[in-house]
Amino acid sequence: MEELTSIFVRSVFIDNMVFAYFLGMCSYLAVSRTVSTANGLGIAVVFVLGFTVPVNYLIENYFLSEGALAWLGPGFANIDLSFLSFILFIAVIASMVQLVEMIVEKFAPALYSSLGIFLPLIAVNCAILGGSLFMQEREYANIAQASAFGLGSGAGFYLAIVGIAAIREKIKYSNVPGPLRGLGITFIVTGLMGIAFMSFMGIAL
Amino acid sequence: MSKTDKEPLFSGKNIKLLSTPLNDENPITVQVLGICSALAVTAMLEPAVVLAVAVIVVMGAANVIISLLRNTIPSRIRIIVQLVVIASLVILVDQVLKAFFYDVSRQLSVFVGLIITNCIIMGRLEAFALGNKPWPSFLDGVGNAAGYGWILIVVGFFRELLGSGNLWGYPVMETLGVYNFGYEDNGFMILPPMALITVGVIIWVQRSRNRKLIESQ
């Protein structure tokens, strides 16, 4: 349990998707004009990352990595399919997004209408595929750890996008130099937020 | 190819396809696409150049393939078809990098895979390749990828030069002897947040020179 908490906290604050790896930047910049839409996208990302990382963990460990097919019989023990991981991961993500969309539509119509267009767009959000690829690279020991990592990364993205949306709502009232207006100042503010997040780096968990 | 005979290969219109994404419609600083993978690999020049070349290859090829298939893809499943084409091309690039440039491939880690979800590629496939002939699509793909690439290389240049005093691993600052005058490397430049601030400054410079890009309040 302690380990799970540690992975969760690490992925929210220290290895934050946005500030440490710049993943999901496109939607982070495009959808952060107001806090309410940022909130919707953030929740959707938490959902999808929490689903796809454990599923891809199972695929990685029971189909793709070297020796993973051993459960089919000894003849399959030394097959290594890991070169297929990109295409399988993206297929899982695209279908998971579709599935999450249908589930949310059925059971939480209010949330569905507030998420609107953002749910389908998540399929091409780099943070989602990045989550699965980092999971593959870091070789988590079991599926619980992978889920903790997925949820933590989602929560980190949520924190970042809601934070920048709040700042951008305030920045509207200040007199930013013309060439920096809009995109430029958002980049610089994100950089400054990243520096603030770096203060978590020294924390050993 | 009979269609292209009517128009020279490098007609003014085609050259424009290649050149506008370099400045006026730059994918990173104007269209705000593909930033995700752009920033993380720019702490040094070499991985930045390699990623830029990889994106140019993938994007040129993906645009041609989708453009050739554009009349046969049913529009309902086009996103999945596009993802499959891009993912297959990225697998090729990844395997080539692993085979011939193993060190760089380790440095780039997950960011080669993330070319798949690079929104520039998807965006150009949707916006251009689905409605145009292969040759203009190819030029559009290469132009946009080059516009993405030069930002990457500029950011990588400044971060490596100011951050570690090297260029492509060669100790420039030491050769110039500036350390003797009390110059010190700014280790801050290597850290992730400075990539964002560097891009912010590039946008600032570009928009001050090109006033029509300034956003209204």
Image: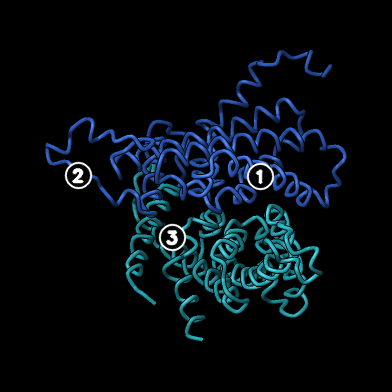
Q: Residues within 10 Å of mark 1 (few under 14, many from 20)?
A: many
Q: Position of residue A28 (x, y in %)?
A: 52, 58
Q: Residue at x 61, y 63 (%)?
A: A132
From the image, state whether disc 3 or disc 1 is nearer to you.
1
- Nearest the viewer among A82 and B60 is A82
- State which chain disc 1 sits on: B
- Nearest the viewer among B16 and B81 is B81
Q: Position of residue B193 (x, y in %)?
A: 38, 54
Q: Residues within 10 Å of mark 2 (few under 14, many from 20)?
A: some
Amino acid at circle 2: Glu
- State which chain disc 2 sits on: B
Amino acid at circle 1: Val
Residue designated by label 3:
A19
Report whether mark 2 lies on the same chain as mark 3. no
Q: Residue at x 68, y 56 (%)?
A: A82
| A32 left or right, relative to A99 | left
Residue designated by label 2:
B184
Q: CA distance from mark 2 to mark 1?
A: 40 Å
Chain letter matching colour blue: B
Tell me if residue B129 comes above or below residue A122 in the rendering: above
Q: Position of residue B75 (x, y in %)?
A: 83, 47
Tell me if residue A115 comes above or below residue B85 in the rendering: below
Chain letter matching colour cyan: A
Q: Residue furthest bottom?
A: A1
Q: Position of residue B84 (x, y in %)?
A: 75, 48
Q: How is the image coloured?
A: by chain
Q: CA distance from mark 2 to mark 3?
A: 26 Å
Q: Count how many numbered circles sit on residues in the image.
A: 3
Q: Residues within 10 Å of mark 3 (few under 14, many from 20)?
A: many
Q: Is disc 1 placed on a helix, strand or loop?
A: helix
- Nearest the viewer among B99 and A42 is B99
| B205 left or right, relative to A153 | left
